[in-house]
Image (cartoon, rainbow, N blue to C red):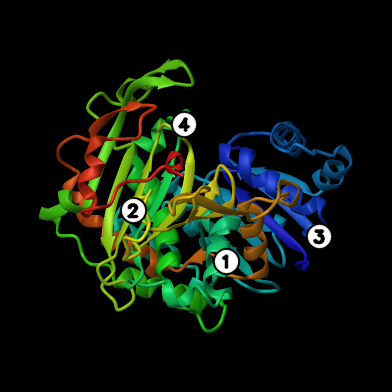
């Protein structure tokens, strides 16, 4: 499906997000004919000509697009312009002559500038849908806590309607996340077992081997909870737990996610230690090299309380999930880099077989480093005795030759087509902050537990687990 002629305005056009992720995605969409009548307008504070901006983008494309084509770029760059200015109405008015018809404004900016940009665009009338639609894409995080999220909503709504706002979470554009939905609802055998009668626990993990990578200004304000759990992992959590949807559309799906979040049992601030653990990486060894601890990283204050690891335990008080713990965790400088949703089914109530103490199955949706679905099951061990052994039934979600797009391409096309299915409604954001706010308030005091870089994370994460549960890792399979 092709979209109508479109003007894409990128605010923060010279930043790292545009360079590494956003513009390579735009280039690939254009190369595949998905955005044939596209005009790109870059906007940033740096003084440069449109030609200099095009040269800047070309350098980035050659670095981040493996199959870069000079012929494709020559066609695209003819449709790329640049305007310099800040976010004040006086400066941002310079965009008016560049924008006509359908327009998509992408805020590739630091989070503290989102409201200034939205108000600036609206104050000069660029939000008005005269002669075409106008949409605003906002990156995460959406506020820093519940109060600031509500304040951001009020500022956005000074000029923009909710149907014009596209709160992007690139995890929702990932193939495996969407396959989680298809696997649940397209296979009849799943629904009878997707409940508390059969499922013992659910673990959602996003582990990184990377450290700060120069992002200390943002990360030391955010930390693992705001950077990963409040948005990415909470969204995956909601999609894992939702009730079956009767119709696949944006409002229906998002309403079901909100209902899950509204059903999460509140965490009292005085009991945070029972439901949440924080850690901070210390010195260690990664790939055979010594690496510094977080407090030794360039730019990090010596008295920082920022966590680089966060884990929480949630319960959903509804019929489907009564008593099932959902464990969510994310950390930097971990032993392995992987992202997965792991569902453990309850143990088989039999002692007929020997060789395995725990006869419980795992269904694992792997998102990183490979996108695939694994079912950990049991089969007979070859030989004369009736003994069991673990077998892993694995299916690749897509082959490498099929994966020539990224989550950003999916979400840019969705926004251009007006499909908000994989974008967040404000009440989703609000409910996620409601769940986590007591934890963040409790963490304003004390310090995170230190863990060695290259390890499995802080030892304290084990205290979250219900009896008989343990944190799994890819090495367990």
Check disc 1 and report its element: helix, strand or loop.
loop
- Where in the figure is residue 428, as x and y percent of width and height? 39, 67
Q: Earlier in the sequence, mark 3 or mark 2?
A: 3
Cα distance, mark 2 to mark 1? 58 Å
Residue depth check, mark 1 versus mark 4: number of the one nearer the observer: 4
Residue receiving disc 3: 37
Mark before the other along the chain sequence, 1 or 3: 3
Q: Residue 350, percent across and down?
A: 32, 64
Element under disc 3: loop
SS of the residue under disc 2: loop
Q: Earlier in the sequence, mark 2 or mark 4?
A: 4
CB within 8 Å, label 2 to label 4: no
Reading the chain from its start, which is encountered first: label 4 or label 3?
3
Rendered image: mark on residue 358: 2
Question: Which residue is denoted by mark 4 in the rendering?
Answer: 210
Q: Which mark is residue 127?
A: 1
| Left or right: 51, with 110 as reference point | right
Quarter of the image containing the N terminus?
bottom right
Specify few, some or many for label 2: CA neighbours under 10 Å numbering under 14, 14-19, or 20 or more: few
Q: Nearer the viewer, mark 2 or mark 1?
A: 2
Q: Marks 2 and 4, how far apart in space?
A: 34 Å
Please tell me which residue lies in front, 45 or 221: 221
């Amino acid at each position: 499906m092709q979209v109508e002629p479109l003007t894409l305005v990128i605010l923060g056009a010279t930043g790292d997000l545009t360079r590494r992720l956003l513009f390579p995605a735009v280039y690939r969409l254009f190369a595949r004919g998905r955005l044939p009548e596209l005009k790109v307008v870059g906007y940033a504070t740096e003084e440069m000509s449109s030609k200099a901006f095009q040269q800047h983008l070309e350098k980035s494309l050659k670095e981040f697009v493996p199959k870069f084509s000079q012929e494709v770029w020559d066609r695209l760059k003819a449709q790329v312009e640049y305007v310099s200015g800040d976010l004040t109405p006086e400066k941002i008015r310079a965009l008016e002559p560049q924008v006509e018809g359908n327009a998509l404004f992408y805020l590739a900016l630091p989070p503290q500038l989102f409201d200034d940009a939205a108000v600036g665009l609206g104050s000069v009338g660029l939000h008005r849908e005269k002669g075409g639609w106008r949409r605003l894409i906002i990156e995460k995080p959406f506020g820093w806590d519940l109060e600031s999220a509500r304040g951001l909503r009020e500022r956005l709504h000074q000029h923009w309607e909710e149907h014009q706002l596209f709160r992007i979470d690139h995890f929702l554009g990932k193939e495996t996340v969407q396959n989680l939905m298809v696997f649940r609802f397209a296979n009849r055998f799943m629904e009878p077992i997707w409940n508390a009668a059969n499922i013992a626990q659910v673990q959602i993990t996003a582990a990184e081997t990377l450290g700060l990578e120069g992002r200390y200004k943002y990360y030391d304000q955010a930390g693992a909870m705001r950077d990963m759990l409040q948005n990415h992992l909470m969204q995956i959590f909601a999609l894992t737990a939702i009730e079956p949807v009767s119709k696949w559309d944006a409002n229906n799906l998002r309403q079901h996610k909100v209902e899950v979040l509204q059903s999460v049992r509140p965490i009292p601030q005085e009991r945070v230690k029972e439901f949440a653990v924080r850690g901070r990486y210390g010195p260690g060894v990664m790939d055979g090299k010594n690496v510094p601890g977080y407090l030794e990283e360039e730019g990090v204050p010596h008295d920082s309380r920022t966590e680089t690891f966060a884990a929480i335990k949630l319960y959903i008080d509804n019929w489907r999930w009564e008593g099932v713990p959902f464990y969510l965790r994310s950390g930097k400088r971990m032993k392995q880099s992987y992202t997965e949703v792991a569902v453990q089914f309850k143990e088989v109530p039999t002692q007929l077989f020997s060789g395995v103490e725990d006869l419980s199955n795992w269904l694992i949706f792997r998102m990183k480093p490979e996108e695939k679905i694994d079912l950990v099951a049991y089969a007979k061990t070859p030989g004369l005795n009736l003994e069991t052994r673990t077998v892993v039934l694995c299916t690749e979600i897509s082959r490498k030759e099929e994966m020539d797009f990224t989550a950003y391409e999916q979400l840019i096309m969705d926004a251009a087509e007006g499909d908000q299915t994989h974008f967040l409604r404000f009440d989703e954001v609000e409910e996620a902050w409601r769940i986590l706010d007591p934890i963040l308030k409790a963490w304003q005091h004390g310090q995170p537990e230190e863990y060695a870089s290259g390890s499995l994370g802080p030892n304290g994460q084990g205290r979250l687990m219900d009896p008989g549960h343990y944190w799994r890792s890819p090495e367990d399979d």
